[in-house]
Amino acid sequence: IQDITFETEDDEKKSAKEALMLWTKRRTKGYRNVKVTNFTSSWRDGLAFASLIHKHRPDLIDFDSMGRDTPVENLEMVFDVAEEKLGIPKLLDVEDVNVEFPDEKSVMTYVANYYHTFAKMKTGDVSSKRIVKMISFLQECEATQHEYNRLASSLLEWIHQTIDTLGNRNLPNMLTGVQSLLADFARYRTEEKPPKYTEKGNLEVLFYNLNAKLRSQSQPGFVPEDGKLIGDIAECWTLLEQAEHAREVALREEIMRLERLERMAEKFDKKAGMRANWLIENHKLVSQDNFGIGIAAVEAAKKKHEAIQTDIKAYESRVKTVVDMANTLENEQYWGIDRVKGDLDKILELWEVLLHALVGRRQRLELAYAYTKALQDVNDLVEYLRDLKVQLQSTDYGRHLGDVDILLQKQTLLESEYTATQPRIVIALDVPDNLLEMKGEEEVPLSASCDTLRALVIQVDELLKGRRVKLEASQHLHKFYEDVDNEDEWIGEKMKILSAAQLGTDLPTAASLLKHHELFDMEVNSHSDIVQQVCDLGRGSFKVITLTVTTCNRECNSYKNIMRNLYNSANRDRCDYLKLSLSKLISATQMRY
């Protein structure tokens, strides 16, 4: 009971607290050790309660025997007497009062019960009636205040809980779940909120009616507890409506987001299926090694592979698009992200397998190209050496010296070409083991072709050396024939000179002819070395070509006999004849003198 006024017998308006205090002071006045100034510490020793009882019922308490030094015993006795003898409820315990500052309202309420009890004992007292009436009024107002506080607390608690619920953004990650929340929100607005709005209005009516009653009794207006004013409730209601709006916006935005994610997921599924089929088909394509036979077919396969590789590299952007979509779904926490990531892992695995197969096919293609190129190079060299072998196996060594010289020039050209081909042969035969172990679709494998090439190289080397030796021998032979013809012509000329009959008609002439003959004799004698050289050259050539040694010796001996006859003729017949002629000329000259 606080701050309520009423009229006393002197028509002075007092509050309930003041009136009760005034009544208490009057009833306890004159009692030893009793001085009531408040409803707290003035009552802690129990003497004030005892004085009130003794004032109205002195037969119930021996006040003179009570002292301030026994507050616990005093309080226990007063509470027991009031309850047992006067019917006043025991609203307080000794522990509630025997403290430094007892609760004021509790003490006032308990003292008010004393007042009501004693007021009934004096019904004729007008002020007592008015006090009873005012106290009833005040108790009714107090009950109304408690009701207001209770209703306000309940409404505010509901508002705060609802704001917390509406502010919860831990929403389901599925479209159906958010749609269910939106339906619950709609039910909240149509079913749960309207009664609370009515309750809010009733609370305002209660507040204004209570204050109107208090004003009618000239009592101070009712001030609710902190945070429970009408303005506070209105402010919380505004926050509630703001939370409602934010909740509705959040739900609708979340629905839009989930619908967008559902559309994106459908698009991802479609694209993922297309990408997976494309990757599988292209993996089948690059797994085929149908490169064909021959360097032209392999080169065409290389160009086709480059085109396939270009298409696959260009397809990487499409795979990246699927990856980006999956990342977006994961970042936005799509509810089916596990399935999406599973499909994405499958696509990425197919992509890696395709790239690995592409690299493998490229390596196999390069190996096939190297094999085919090596085989073609070897086969080209084999064909070249076979043609060269046929030319070197020719038995045409020339029919005359000029023809032999042409064949030797041709032989030099062949040797130069062959020498220039040596690096190609070395490279062609320097084939890696992995190529030699391969087996292509050709009838003759590379290893066999290499063996054939090595054998041909050995054969051609021998043929080149042998044919040059034979061509040089043929050149020497035809030179021998030419030298023989020249010697034959020289011998014929010398024989003509020997057969000449000029002996001289006088001594000087004869002496001169003799001198010339001696010189001729020396020339013939020295020419025999040249004949020997020609014969030696002929024998060497005959050994290399096809003539026998006997034939060679016969030819050489024939020319030697001719030279010997020429020599004998020059030394014996012609010389003797010239000497005889010279003797005759000398005798004739002497006779003349």
Image (cartoon, grey):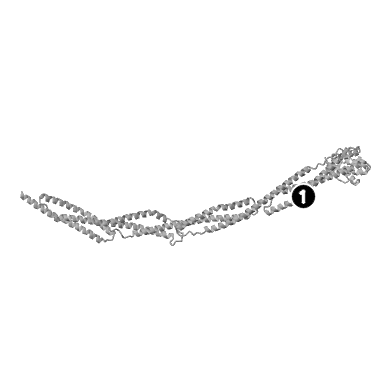
How packed is label 1: few (under 14 Cα within 10 Å), some, or many (20 or more)?
A: few
Instruction: Inspect the image, locate mark 1, and give the three-letter code of the amino acid beneath it.
Output: Pro
Q: Is residue 186 visible?
A: yes
- Quarter-wise, where is residue 376 in the image? bottom left
Q: Is residue 463 left or right of residue 218?
A: left
Residue 352 appears left or right of 574: right
- Mark 1, secondary structure of its residue: helix
Q: Is residue 254 left or right of residue 580?
A: right
Residue 528: image location, x then y, percent: 21, 54
Q: Visible in this render: residue 459?
A: no
Give residue 202's position: percent from left, percent from top: 80, 47
Residue that carries the numbered disc 1 in the rendered image: 194
Q: Nearer the viewer, residue 112 or 161?
A: 161
The structure residue drawn at horizontal position 52% and vertical position 53%, both measured from the top left corner, is 310
Which quadrant holds the N terminus? top right
Q: Nearer the viewer, residue 164 or 207?
A: 207
Task: Using the image, determine if residue 513 lies above or below residue 41.
Answer: below
Residue 422 % position (x, y): 38, 54
What is the count of numbered marks? 1
Question: Residue 314's spot in the image, x, y percent?
Answer: 54, 52
Taking the view exactly as shown, the residue that stands out farthest to the bottom is: 443
Q: Nearer the viewer, residue 393 or 56?
A: 393
